[in-house]
Amino acid sequence: MAYNFRPVNRDQLYLLPPSLRDGLPEDHLAWFLIDAVEQMDLRAFRSKYRADGWGGESDDPTMMVTLLLYAYCVGERSSRRIERLCLEDVAFRVITANQKPDHVTIARFRQRHERELAELFTQVLRLCREAGLGKVGVVALDGTKVKANASLAANRTYDAIRQEVEKMLREAEATDREEDERYGSGRRGDALPEELRHRASRLERLKACKRRLEDEAAREAARQQARIEERKAQEQATGKKRRGRKPKAPDPSVDPAAKANVTDPDSRIMKTRQGFVQGYNAQAVVSEDQLIVAAAVTQDANDVGQLHPMLQQAQANLQAAGVDKPIRAVVADAGYWSEANVKQAPVEGPELFLATSKEWKQRQAWKDAPPPRGRIPKGLSLRERMERKLRTRRGQAIYAKRSQTVEPVFGQIKAVRGADRFLRRGLAACDSEWKLLCLTHNLLKLWRKVTKGSASSPFGWMAAALA
């Protein structure tokens, strides 16, 4: 008796021309993104190309945007891996229509259009709003440390940086003199010699590190001078000398031990629960249904200065997306607490629920004392008022939403999609990459909502949503 196996004939020809639409089910994420991007306004992308038809052919920006969005959605950010998947993966081949953009094209497109890619954030928010996502009554704000494309070992002291810059410039000057004597002075005087040209980018990074440390020292000296003048003005106004140690005279010189990273000068040393990393502080404002309504990257290691800028960005994004409902309350951990932040909050703005201590201390305080009732006692400081508000039943209920909104979002981005490190360097590039990660997070939320239980194509509403 013979085996009854299906035949495996790899030389079998198709009887009819194959169709890309047969490769994926209709509710697949790739088809969703293709339909979504076709409705987006990509004129900012096309404006960077010639409109007269001259020159070599370029990849369609619509296809390239879709390719990047899909790659980021499935956790693929390496241009080389994306290039390989355009050959091996059915979904990538559907998106590119069997074209094969190489990794250089993909990387250059992402670099050339970093601002335009970040600006797609509000268009995606508008789509989410049309689908009923974005419960912004209560939003949570938090930051997470994301590793830079640089190593902690690449940090150098100011003295080491200065000596290396001077050494490279001396080598360049010596080679210039030698070549002038040998070949004449016809070479451009500002060009690096051949053996140093491959080190040009390193020299520029070293100079950027040196400038950064010098600028920081100058700013600190200016702040110190301002404190001295403020103290002097108070003494003149009161006629009495202030107690305490007199501030030191400002010193604009750079501390020789001050460090900067020569791989990514914009990155900073950040403290995390796992130790110190070279990275950035990525911020996000998240709605109750885990939709990111604002995103940004900062170099500041702490969060205290990010509260109001992030809230202003969130309100601007929601307004641009056509969301009429205002943000009523904001919850954030103790990293955002300061009396200055509370004083700066507008009266008509959202109500602040800011932890004043670490969460384990806060939970212990809730257990030790019953929720306060009645009118707020007089004479309480701003900190005591906030602590009392968080101990009330309403305050506890609202603050509890923080751990179930913003923290899972960071887990989905960093752990599930593997985006715990930036692939690009520089503050602007990392800010664009973070916004791209956040808007693809929103697209995944939208895709799961509109495809859930849909028997037919769920994408027909997109044209009206972005019209």
Image: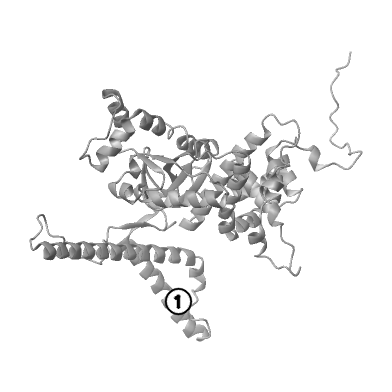
- Residue 94 is drawn in which quadrant? top right
Provide the secondary structure element on which disc 1 rests: helix
Q: Which residue occupies the extreme left position in the image? A: 240
- Residue 263 is drawn in which quadrant? bottom left
Closer to us: 405 or 92: 405
Q: Position of residue 317 (x, y in %)?
A: 52, 51
Q: Residue at x 32, y 35 (%)?
A: 389
Q: Residue at x 48, y 39 (%)?
A: 137
> How many numbered circles does the render carry?
1
Read off the residue under disc 1. Answer: 175
Q: Quadrant of the N terminus?
A: top right
Q: Which residue occupies the extreme top position in the image? A: 1
Q: Which residue occupies the extreme front position in the image? A: 375
Q: Position of residue 408 (x, y in %)?
A: 48, 34
Q: Is residue 426 visible?
A: no
Q: Is residue 217 above or below residue 268?
A: below
Q: Is residue 446 left or right of residue 277?
A: right
Q: Is residue 301 left or right of residue 53?
A: left
Q: Position of residue 443 (x, y in %)?
A: 61, 42
Q: Residues within 10 Å of mark 1 (few under 14, many from 20)?
A: some
Closer to us: 165 or 218: 218
Q: Which residue occupies the extreme right position in the image? A: 15
